[in-house]
Structures are given as C-alpha cells and as structure tokens.
Image (cartoon, helix red, strand yellow):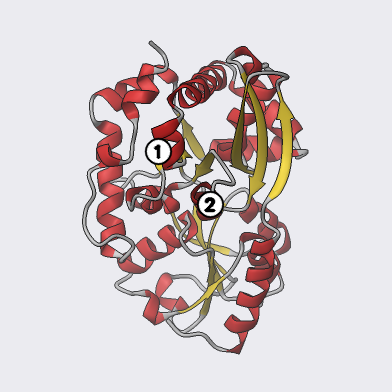
Amino acid sequence: MTHGPLSTALAGLSALALLTACGSGSSSGSSGDKVRLGYINDFNGASLIAIAEAEGLWKKHGLTAETKTFTNGPLQIQALGTDNLDFGYIGPGAMWLPASGQAKVVAINTLGNSDRVLAQPGIETMRQLKGKTVAVPEGTSGDMILSLALKKAGMTKDDIEVVPMDPSTIVSAFSSRQVDGAGFWYPAAATIKKQVPDLRELAKNTDFEKDVSFPTAFVAGNKVVADQPEKVEKVLAVLRDAIEFRSAHTDEAIQLTADKLKLPVEQVAADAANNKLLSLDELDSLTRDGTVAKWLKGMNDYFVEVGKLDKPVDPETYYTGDLFVGAGE
C-alpha cells in the first residue's frame, strides 16, 4: 500500500470528516432507563430506530432513547469503548471489532448486499485498477468487498494505491474524478451514480455469497452487557418488536425510515432492496441452529486472512444469541 500526495491530502480531509461524524439525534420516551444508541443513516442502520420511535416501542419497554448518527461502524465501537454510547449498529466490515473483544453482538439485523467496488468509466476489470487510486473507509464493509474482489482477481492491496477516506469524502472525490475507484456501498453509491452515470461496478456482495455471508448487526458495550442485563433485555425487546414490524409491514417501514432520514421514499426503497430482511422467527431459528455462528465463523476466516484477527474466534465469545432469543421468551 502506497500513499502519495493525493492520498495524504485526502486522508487529511477524511480525518476532518471523522471529527464531525457523530451528531446528536432524537430522544423518545418520557420515562424509564436512558439508553444511548448509535445508528447509520441508511435503511439497514436506521429502519429499526425509525420504527421504534414511530411505534412508541421505547416507552412500551420502559426506556428513554437518545439516538446519535455515525458515518460508520468502527466509530461506534470506539464510542462504546469510551462509554459515550451503550448500543450501536455495524455493517459486516466492522464485525472483526467485536470478534476481537471490543464489543458484543447482541442482535443480527439483515444480510447485506449493498457493497460495491466502483470504478471510473473506462476501467472494466479489477486488474485494470492496478497502480490506481482506490478510496475506502478502512475497517468497513467497503474495505471488505475491496479485499475480497482483489483476492478473486489474484491481487492484493499492494497492487493499488489505497486512499483511506471517510464516506462523505468518497462521494465528492469519486464524483470529481480525484480517485479511480472505491470500495463503497449503497445508498451513498447512488449519489455518486447521479454525478458519474457511466461508472462501473466491478464487484458486489453476491459475487462471494457461496463463501461468506454479510450480516449487519446491533452491538453493545462489553460493560453494558456485563453490568446492565435488564437494560440489555429491554433494548433487545425493542429491537425484536421493530424487526417483527419491519418484516410484516416492509413498505411502511421504508416510509418511516424515509421520514426519519428526510430522504425520498424511492431512494430508501432502492436501498432496502439491496438487503435481505430476516423475520423474527428466522433470526431465532438461525441463532438456535448455529447458522448465525456459521456466518460469523466464515467472516472470521476472512478477517484472519486479511490480518484483522490473529486467529479464528469462537462466535460464542461475542455473539450473545442466547440473550436475543431469551428476550422473546
């Protein structure tokens, strides 16, 4: 991996963006335990929060929620570790952080298919990215899809010039042709597509689905899980109710998410279509029969391969599936 003047300058912009990545959101509920919860402004990250607020689920379960927006999962894991957050949302690319002991996965959310390797017009294959600048938010699912696509092409990150960059900076950098490619995701990729309609999508999640699944999840701080079991159970009850609502009333869930994020409903619907929604019964069953653990093991093998983890980790050490299922009993 090399870093030229361009990457240095853009990385500086990225750092500035990261400093302002976290903003305060809304509170809901008037009494009970206070919970601080992070999310990302897309369907995967925000739909359950939007449902919980609209349906009064926080109050129903005796909670008052303070929600905060973040641009990616790793920032939320960091906030959990510094006790600035109780719960958060991560995509598959950040799953190595709980696997390395930095948080607990308390609920599986969806199976993602939003990630892409994007390239400027004229670049038709991964091999043609050799020696070119590729922007990526490090430690995210954009990083993951890039690494998988490089491996499939017989390449590594040493074959390209990786430019670490915040998601919002990638949109402007790619649109203005400052970078040749990006490991990125929808719905933000749709914004780029409006500016560069003839861009190329060189890789997507489903290219690798035989070998690895891409679960998104809600996470909690280690101390929260250890010291506040009642709060954890209440939050899981809220998430379970919201998952059930989203599965039974998907169109309404899309509308509620669009309202919360102040986005066109068509954009949120397109975002939702890039992911597989799982019903509550499915999540309980997949947790009980070990399928979720199998997904996580598959991801751990990938994270070991790319150097994020030193060795494979047993999902039971960080996925509290028993608590998730138990919250419904």
Residue at the image point whose x is 30% and y is 34% from the top: 292
- State the image coordinates of residue 3 (x, y, percent, origin top left): 51, 85
Q: Amino acid at mark 2?
A: Thr
Q: Which residue is mark 2?
A: 82
Residue, far front? 227
Q: Amino acid at mark 1?
A: Val
- State the image coordinates of residue 187 (x, y, percent, origin top left): 62, 48
Q: Would residue 203 be visible to someone looking at this image?
A: yes
Residue, far bottom? 5
SS label for mark 2: loop
Q: Which residue is mark 1?
A: 105
Q: In the image shown, does 87 or 226 lie closer to the viewer?
A: 226
Is tag 1's residue or tag 2's residue first in the polypeptide sequence? 2
Q: In the image shown, does 67 or 131 lie closer to the viewer?
A: 67
Q: Is residue 100 left or right of residue 256?
A: left
Give the quadrant of residue 196.
Answer: bottom right
- State the image coordinates of residue 139 (x, y, percent, origin top left): 46, 60
Q: Would residue 111 be visible to someone looking at this image?
A: no
- State the image coordinates of residue 318 (x, y, percent, origin top left): 32, 41
Assign the N terminus to one quadrant of the image.
Answer: bottom left
